[in-house]
Image (cartoon, grey):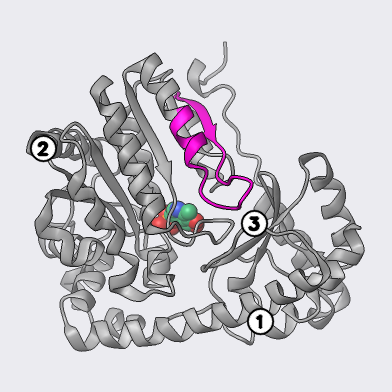
């Protein structure tokens, strides 16, 4: 017998990201920055490859009162002004249409993890996309859950509603409840964003299945503020949730990491909606307990930063403008890569917007292709069913000609 609980014995992280980042950094030291294409970096960088820090955010943080930073938050679930402003930011004009609850969490990660914990019991099944953010699986294991995946895309490169329906109904039959994750818009790692009619179909499935149990949808909106459609356009689909069966709940996992480029502040939250007030009260009660039972409270200064910006029209406008220039930059970078990829027939998943583009690669060829790319000083990241190119962290000049190079290397 060792020191660990049985449930912790086989928990260890295999981090493919940090290994590749290190390889890229070693190559830069050896061959010089200009001779290495580093598309590992998952954070936003400017055209000089420098980590982006929004001035419109840092200026506000610098001027916060010490008492807005040092003490504990007002409550375990977060500061009142933060909760108010987060609800308003996430739901926009739709806020009044539902019963709404909110808690602050350490980043979007805290929101996803606490949702898994409070919706499913150990050994139950969580439904996630077959291509997605790696930590969903780690969090599921942390809470002793099993995983089932739906195919994210159909052969027409659309959201695979048939697979979503099939897997959801199988789980509803076996456990009388479904918790499914969707990461929309600006899906990580493909850059896909769903259409309004795809969202309508998701809600229809949730409602159809709710005759046999509760359907809880976790929409991870970590990248929502990078949607090309802008603030209002990117939230338009939320209108569809007015048709949600009262048995159902939607949790939005919100993150200040990308919205404010403040990854290290660890501020995010769950905003949850339902057409049945009891669902909100129950979910709130359990989550309040989780806040106290796991992380106690979220950094006060980070919450104050967000609520100060969101609550002030001028500050909010400055942030939207500054972030807007990066949305344009992402569009420019994606065009460079995608136009070339199309020209030479390099297959990618359907990118619409956001931080990442992913190459379609057969599973058994991923590792081999990565090695070949590394030999030519190109450093992308391995993901499920593909290879991820982080256009967010790579200056445009490094993306010119990249698709062609990759195609030549992996062919
Ligand atoms: C898809 C997705 N969801 C959630 C997060 C959560 O980030 P954080 O915990 O920093 O808010 C990330 C961060 O990389 C992400 O890519």
Quarter of the C terminus within the rendering: bottom right
Q: Which mark is residue 349?
A: 3
The answer to whether the beta carbon of the residue marked 1 is less than 8 Å from any atom of ligand 1 is no
Q: Is residue 92 left or right of residue 110?
A: left
Dot 3 or dot 2, earlier in sequence: 2
Q: Is residue 127 left or right of residue 95?
A: right
Quarter of the N terminus within the rendering: top right
What is the crowding at mark 2: few (fewer than 14 residues within 10 Å), some, or many (at least 20)?
Answer: some
Q: Position of residue 31 (x, y in %)?
A: 88, 76
Q: CA distance from mark 3 to mark 2?
A: 37 Å
Residue with the mark numbered 1? 395
Q: Is residue 125 left or right of residue 65?
A: right
- Residue range (magenta): 144-167
SS state under label 1: loop
Residue at x 49% of width, y 19% of height? 7
Q: Position of residue 6 (x, y in %)?
A: 51, 16
What is the crowding at mark 3: few (fewer than 14 residues within 10 Å), some, or many (at least 20)?
Answer: some
Residue with the mark numbered 2? 276
Query: How many badges with numbers are in the image?
Result: 3
Dot 2 or dot 1, earlier in sequence: 2
Q: CA distance from mark 3 to mark 1?
A: 21 Å
The reply to whether the C-beta atoms of the residues labelled 2 and 1 are less than 8 Å apart is: no
Does the stretch in magenta take in 145?
Answer: yes
Q: Nearer the viewer, mark 2 or mark 1?
A: 2
The reply to whether the C-beta atoms of the residues labelled 3 and 1 are less than 8 Å apart is: no
Residue closest to the eye, 392 or 232: 232
Dot 3 or dot 1, earlier in sequence: 3
Residue closest to the eye, 356 or 319: 356
Residue at x 73% of width, y 56% of height? 20
């Amino acid at each position: 017998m060792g020191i660990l609980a049985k449930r912790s014995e086989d928990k260890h992280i295999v981090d493919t990201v940090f290994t590749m980042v290190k390889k890229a950094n070693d190559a830069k030291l050896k061959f010089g920055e200009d001779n290495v294409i580093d598309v590992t970096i998952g954070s936003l960088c400017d055209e000089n490859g420098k980590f982006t820090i929004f001035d419109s955010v840092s200026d506000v943080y610098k001027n916060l009162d010490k008492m807005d930073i040092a003490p504990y938050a007002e409550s375990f679930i977060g500061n009142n002004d933060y909760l108010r402003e987060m609800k308003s930011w996430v739901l926009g004009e739709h806020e009044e249409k539902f019963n709404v609850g909110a808690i602050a969490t350490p980043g979007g990660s805290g929101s996803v993890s606490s949702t898994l914990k409070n919706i499913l019991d150990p050994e139950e099944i969580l439904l996630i996309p077959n291509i997605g953010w790696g930590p969903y699986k780690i969090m599921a294991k942390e809470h002793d859950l099993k995983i089932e995946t739906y195919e994210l895309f159909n052969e027409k490169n659309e959201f695979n509603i048939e697979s979503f329906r099939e897997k959801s109904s199988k789980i509803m039959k076996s456990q009388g409840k479904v918790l499914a994750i969707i990461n929309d818009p600006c899906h990580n790692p493909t850059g896909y964003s769903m259409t309004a009619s795809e969202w309508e179909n998701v809600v229809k499935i949730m409602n159809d299945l709710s005759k046999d149990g509760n359907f809880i949808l976790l929409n991870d909106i970590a990248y929502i503020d990078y949607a090309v459609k802008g603030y209002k356009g990117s939230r338009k689909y939320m209108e569809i949730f007015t048709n949600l069966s009262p048995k159902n709940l939607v949790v939005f996992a919100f993150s200040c990491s990308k919205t404010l480029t403040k990854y290290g502040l660890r501020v995010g939250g769950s905003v949850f909606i339902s057409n049945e007030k009891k669902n909100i009260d129950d979910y709130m009660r359990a989550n309040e307990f989780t806040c106290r039972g796991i992380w106690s409270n979220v950094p006060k200064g980070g919450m104050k930063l967000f609520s100060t910006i969101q609550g002030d029209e001028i500050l909010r406008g400055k942030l939207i403008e500054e972030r807007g220039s990066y949305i344009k930059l992402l569009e420019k970078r994606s065009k460079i890569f995608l136009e070339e990829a199309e020209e030479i027939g390099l297959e990618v998943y359907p990118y619409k917007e956001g931080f990442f583009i992913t190459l379609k690669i057969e599973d058994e060829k991923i590792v081999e292709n990565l090695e070949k790319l590394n030999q030519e000083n190109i450093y992308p990241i391995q993901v499920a069913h593909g290879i991820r190119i982080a256009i967010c962290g790579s200056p445009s000049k490094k993306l010119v000609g990249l698709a062609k190079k990759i195609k030549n290397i992996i062919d």
